Image (spheres, grey):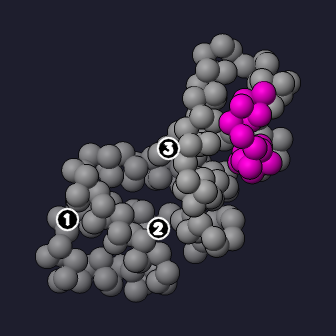
Amino acid sequence: MPHAQASHPLQHGHAGDWLRQHKNMPLNEQQRALQSDPTFRHLTPQQQQQLQQRLQHFSGLPPQQQQRMLNRMETWEHLTPEQKNQAREVFGQMRQLPPERRRMVTSAVRDLRAMPPAQRDQIIDSERFKGMFSPQERETIRGAARLPLAPESGEGNGPQQ
């Protein structure tokens, strides 16, 4: 979800700080806190509405998914502009894949994340992966594997690699 990785307009410190600070409140209290935030009041009505929709979506997620989203926001904040462009390309390529293939590619990236880069490349170039994934899918996996990845929920915050 690329929109989840964009900087939070109300952030005063790190990406996701506002959400971390307010995530255990009921939605109606979160919405009140959002509407009373001076930064929120200076946004255009369209930006305010978009932010309210994102807050509602975030609040409806299970805690584990909320943590994953917060981890991705933190990681995104630390990417260089070049890495952000690369991430947008990879996410765009992933969106082009049919859902079942996207799940397989995502699973492969998840499995590769704990490996050193040389081992990742060796596996991506293996006969097994060549049999499982198209050349385009393997390049998508390779691109995703080169990005600093957000930790799984439950792990610490910040980029990994």
Q: Which of pointers 3 and 2 lies earlier in the amino acid sequence?
A: 3
Picture coordinates of residue 70 (x, y %)? 64, 54
Q: Which residue is mark 2?
A: 146
Mark 3 crowdedness (10 Å alpha carbons): few <14, some 14-19, many ≥20:
few
Range drawn in magenta:
15-32
| Badge nearest the viewer, 3 or 2 | 3
Is any part of residue 121 visible from this angle? yes
Mark 1 crowdedness (10 Å alpha carbons): few <14, some 14-19, many ≥20:
some
Q: Quadrant of residue 27?
A: top right
Q: Residue at x 42, y 71 (%)?
A: 110
Q: Which of pointers 1 and 2 lies earlier in the amino acid sequence?
A: 1
Amino acid type assigned to the residue bearing label 2 in the image: Arg
Q: Which residue is mark 3?
A: 2
Q: Kindly report the distance in space between the C-alpha atoms of the residues bearing marks 3 and 1.
A: 24 Å
**Considering only vertical position in the picture, is 3 above or below 67?**
above
Q: Residue at x 61, y 20 (%)?
A: 49
Amino acid type assigned to the residue bearing label 3 in the image: Pro
Q: Which of pointers 3 and 1 lies earlier in the amino acid sequence?
A: 3
Is 95 colored magenta in this rendering? no
Q: Residue at x 63, y 27 (%)?
A: 52
Is any part of residue 72 visible from this angle? no
Q: Which residue is mark 1?
A: 135
* 52 on left or right of 102: right
The residue nearer to you, when weighing 92 against 73, is 73
Q: Main secondary structure of the magenta part?
A: helix
Picture coordinates of residue 81 (x, y %)? 59, 48
